[in-house]
Image (cartoon, rainbow, N blue to C red):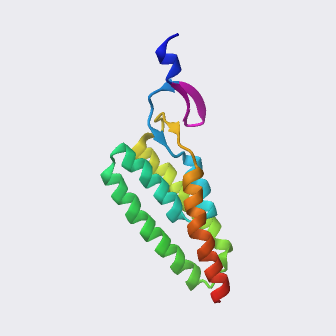
Amino acid sequence: MDNNIENNSTVETGSKNQVVENLPKLYSKRLILVFSGLFSVLFGTVILLSNLKKRGEKKGMIQVGIFALIYVTGMVITIQTMNANTNLALPMNIAGALILNEYFWNRYIGKETEYEKKSWIKPAIISMCISVPAFLALVYLT
């Protein structure tokens, strides 16, 4: 049996699934979008930062971090200034995720980069461990 066949794995390249070998394990663009929408742009940023760290993109990590801080600060100020309810947060989180994916991912990881999809379980557990207590504190302290 050929050893190359045994080392192959399914990967995501854009929207196609292919069989290739020895690719980097990265969190997907879809995961960044989902986590940004469900939790916050900060959660999507942490996932993208993990990918950039794995790829050795220090300049990209700095730019993504600065973007996230400015974006989230601007989002909070906008929502409070407009006295808007939290219904505005979801579309703004998704817009932030699209910027993370379509600008920063494509620029520093590459739009056509092939990679093996990394499991979403660990980030989901961490996100829930942060979000649930924060939500409960918000509900019970107000």
Which residue is farthest bottom?
A: 142
Give 8 or 79, whichever is nearer the viewer: 8
Q: Is residue 83 above or below residue 8?
A: below
Q: Position of residue 118 (x, y in %)?
A: 53, 43
Q: Is residue 11 magenta?
A: yes
Q: Position of residue 27 (x, y in %)?
A: 52, 46
Q: Give me the residue at 63% from left, 62% from top.
A: 38
Q: Is residue 18 above or below residue 75?
A: above
Q: Is residue 95 visible?
A: no
Give 129 or 23, whichever is nearer the viewer: 129
Q: Quadrant of residue 93?
A: bottom right
Task: Name the image quarter holding the C terminus.
Answer: bottom right
Q: Is residue 107 visible?
A: yes
Q: Is residue 10 magenta?
A: yes
Q: Give me the residue at 47% from left, 16% from top.
A: 3
Which residue is farthest left?
A: 59
Q: Quadrant of residue 92?
A: bottom right
Give 100 or 129, whichever is nearer the viewer: 129
Q: Position of residue 85 (x, y in %)?
A: 67, 80
Overall secondary structure of the magenta section: strand
Q: Quadrant of residue 83?
A: bottom right
Q: Give me the residue at 59% from left, 51% from top.
A: 121
Q: Give me the residue at 47% from left, 68% from top.
A: 71
Write down the region rendered in magenta.
8-19
Give 9 or 40, whichever is nearer the viewer: 9
Q: Position of residue 90 (x, y in %)?
A: 64, 66
